[in-house]
Amino acid sequence: MTSVVWFRRDLRTRDLPTLLSADKDALALFVLDKRLTEPSGAARLAFLYRCLRDLDEQLDGRLLVVSGDPVELVPRIAKQIDATSVHVSADYAPYGRERDDKVEAALGDIDFVRSGSPYAVAPGRVTKPDGTPYKVFTPFSRAWADHGWRKPADTDASTVDWIEPPRTSRIPKDPAGVPELPGAGEAAALAAWEKFRDERVDGYSENRNRPDRPGTSWMSPYLRWGCVHPRTLLGDLTPGPYRNELAWREFYADVLWHKPDSARQNLDRRFDKIELDDDREAFDAWCQGMTGFPIVDAGMRQLLELGWMHNRVRMVVASFLVKDLHLPWWWGARHFMKHLVDGDLASNQHNWQWAAGSGTDAAPYFRVFNPTTQGEKFDPNGDYVRRFVPELRGVTGKRVHKPWEIDGIDYPKPIVDHAHEREVALARYNSIKSQP
Ligand code: FAD
């Protein structure tokens, strides 16, 4: 008997439960689906293609990569090789769930077997004692840790005998304009993790908020594509701040699973009534890193240059977009999704909603980040700003966070008065918070 192993967000062979459920003879398949590739910019696409090349090498060149609609292609290819089953890691995001239901229906007599997921605990599993979902992170994270996760599945590329693909495979060339990216694929993911675990995880809580230091793990692109499973990381960790960050990823996946519409609309529907601006020029200045606020501009330019941005700075630029520019959070979320190498619907949309105050477990609405003091606090010597904003390289120390106090610099003046916009934001938030 023959199976199809349909890879999606699990581009690895170690700790991959689908390899245990599949038959010994199996076809490895990946479908480039334009619903997923079109919203991706050069960074995420290139990273995906490189991960696919790495996987293909692991499988001795036997990964079949085809482009088109999975609802048509997966059943057609399964029938072509007389497969009796198709094996996947379950997808919990709104589009993936719908697509998988359609593929399952189109497969007819061929079994569609879901085993495992991109999460330590599958979305929907952790609930309050009364069976309802958690809406607040901290109790969720406790219940999530108590629930626990499976042991890693003992698999590698040789667990299955990969059959010769029935048609020609094509992994596209990297698109133009790819930023500098870390190594892609499973071996690179494991090497990056081991280095972080051995050298930096102990200093994580001290360094994680410092964009001027290499304080975070950079595991997000690997988790995005499943080059490594979070279980592997959790197996090396004791409870602590890093484990807590992985729990945020699981929490947002859980929230999106319960409320798929929250990918596109406010989770707290009172926010539908908040007054928003639509200043495209201000939005462009934000996208290009030309707002005149150095920490904001450094972050936005880091995004364009590396396809990645430090978490602290993601929070600062998101707050700036929604609270200083009063623009819709989904404008910012769309820009992020285009450029981020780790762009992930659940994490992105819900972190944006956290910043906007419209999400679950939101930041208190009266917390408006001051971009200047955030810069001074988390980039105290200005090294992060100087790295990404060349116009300010001649300014020494933390003066770099107040360039408007220095004459003769060719750098934009602040596009807004933060103190004033803060008041505007608070007034608008107060007006909806007082509604039922
Ligand atoms: P580390 O600090 O080393 O954290 C380890 C892992 O924990 C991360 O790889 C990630 O999987 C998880 N994690 C950490 N913080 C968060 C968080 N706040 N929410 C969810 N998971 C978290 N993360 C994405 O993976 N994809 C996104 O599209 C994304 N968009 C974001 C948008 C905004 C506005 C904000 C504020 C945050 C966003 N994040 C997103 C979360 C976070 O910024 C990144 O996961 C993190 O910066 C990735 O770098 P790292 O792997 O070095 O993080």
Image (tube, grey):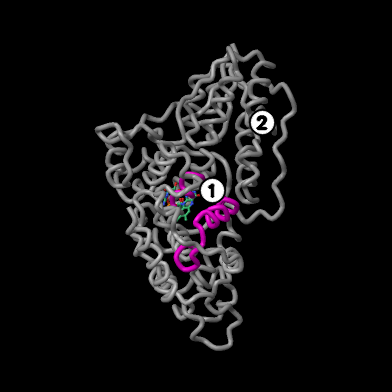
Does 179 sit left or right of 381 as displayed?
right
* Whether residue 421 is situated above or below residue 272 in the rendered picture: below
Measured as percent of width and height from the top left, residue 366 is found at 34, 64
In the rendered image, which residue does mark 2 sit on? Answer: 69
In the rendered image, which residue does mark 1 sit on? Answer: 343
* Whether residue 341 is situated above or below residue 207 in the rendered picture: above
Residue occupying image coordinates x 50% and y 32%: 91
The tally of labels here is 2
Task: Give, as a single range, the part of the protein colored magenta.
Answer: 322-351
Measured as percent of width and height from the top left, residue 375 is found at 43, 71
Measured as percent of width and height from the top left, residue 316 is found at 45, 64
Q: Residues within 10 Å of mark 1 (few under 14, many from 20)?
A: many
Is residue 185 shown to the viewer in this render?
yes
Is residue 198 shown to the viewer in this render?
no
Is residue 336 located in the magenta-colored stretch of the structure?
yes
Where, quadrant-wise, is the N terminus in this rendering? Answer: top right
Residue occupying image coordinates x 62% and y 51%: 43
Question: Of the residues shown, which amino acid type is indicated by label 1?
Answer: Gly
* Whether residue 88 is situated above or below residue 420 in the rendered picture: above
Q: CA distance from mark 1 to mark 2?
A: 21 Å
Secondary structure under tag 1 reads loop
Which residue is the extreme one toward the bottom?
A: 407
